[in-house]
Image: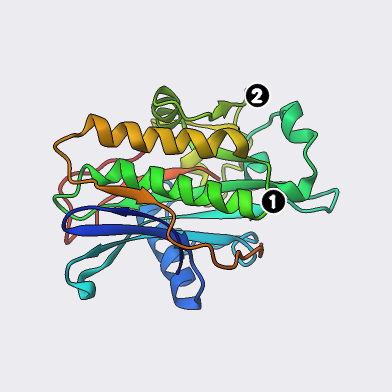
Amino acid sequence: MEILATIALRSYTIDFGVATTVEEREAVLVQRFRVYQREGYYADGVGEDRDEYDQEAVFFLSRLRRADPTRSVMVGSARLIRGGEDCGFEFPCQKGHRFTLPEVVRDTPPAQRAEVGRLVSEMPHGFGMVRLLTTLGLLQAMAWYHEKAGLICGVATIKRRLLRGLTSMGLPLHHIPSEGAIYPRDRPLAPYFHQHPDPVAPAYWLVAEMIPSVRRVIARYRRGAAASPVVKVGPTSRGSWRSSGGLGTGRSYPERHRTRKGGH
């Protein structure tokens, strides 16, 4: 993993960055399937979740490191899809809902747009407070990636409950009005779009707004949790940036760690 951001705590640290090996990319896909399956996002009988965007997408992951390095565990992941110059190119979110791209997105060159999606988190028992930090840390790492890669804006498909929660915290995620979901009902993710009690909606953001905003939210979260052990948030690497290559998000707990179920 190329580490882009780190949140350090007293007894453990969470690193956020880009998956750089075949094994890490496979781990992201496995985690995504596990969480989505547990949250009920798949149609019955779905045994694999790979689509045409995965091969070129940039995968992000977050890894919780404890004092014993052998006990590190992946606690979250997401993918980023860069816009294509082909006039027929569409992001996954455009295939899920019928909507018109906001003017600020339409006016941005396609190669400087991106979609962030498939953001999931799953925490071991006793790490409840880290759940929010995992989401924020992934957003921060991806925002920095956007900036370094020359990306200007992004779109996503995001759970309405998570959208409300993040915007109430001050993150500039802007809801895109739509005419409703158009994702085919016979496709693997039909329950995610049509049947889940927490519906999804398209949204967009601007990198110039997101970077300072997520930094402020993390800092405010730290101040508001004075009893928490968070001591540092910041970038740890300025290495090379991969340019190869939505915010649907689930939250769950592996059987060996599970305390309660939940999803964003």
- Residue at numbered disc 1: 150
Where is 91 relative to 99, above or below?
below
**Farthest residue, direction right:** 87
**In the image, 8: left or right of 210?**
left
SS label for mark 2:
loop
Residue lying at 53% horizontally and 62% vertically, measured from the top left: 238
Q: Using residue 54 as the reference point, say whether residue 107 is left or right of it.
A: right
- Residue at left offset 76%, top offset 51%: 111
Which of the image's four quarters has the C terminus? Answer: top left
Residue wearing tag 2:
179
In-front residue for pair 239/72: 239
Task: Name the residue rendered at 18%, 53% in the picture.
Answer: 258
Q: Give x and y (percent) for residue 153.
A: 66, 40
- Rate crowding at label 2 as few (under 14), some (14 to 19) or many (20 or more) other CA atoms within 10 Å: few
Identified by mark 1, the residue type is Gly
Q: CA distance from mark 2 to mark 1?
A: 31 Å
Residue 188, relative to residue 20: is it above or below? above
| Secondary structure category for the residue under label 1 | loop
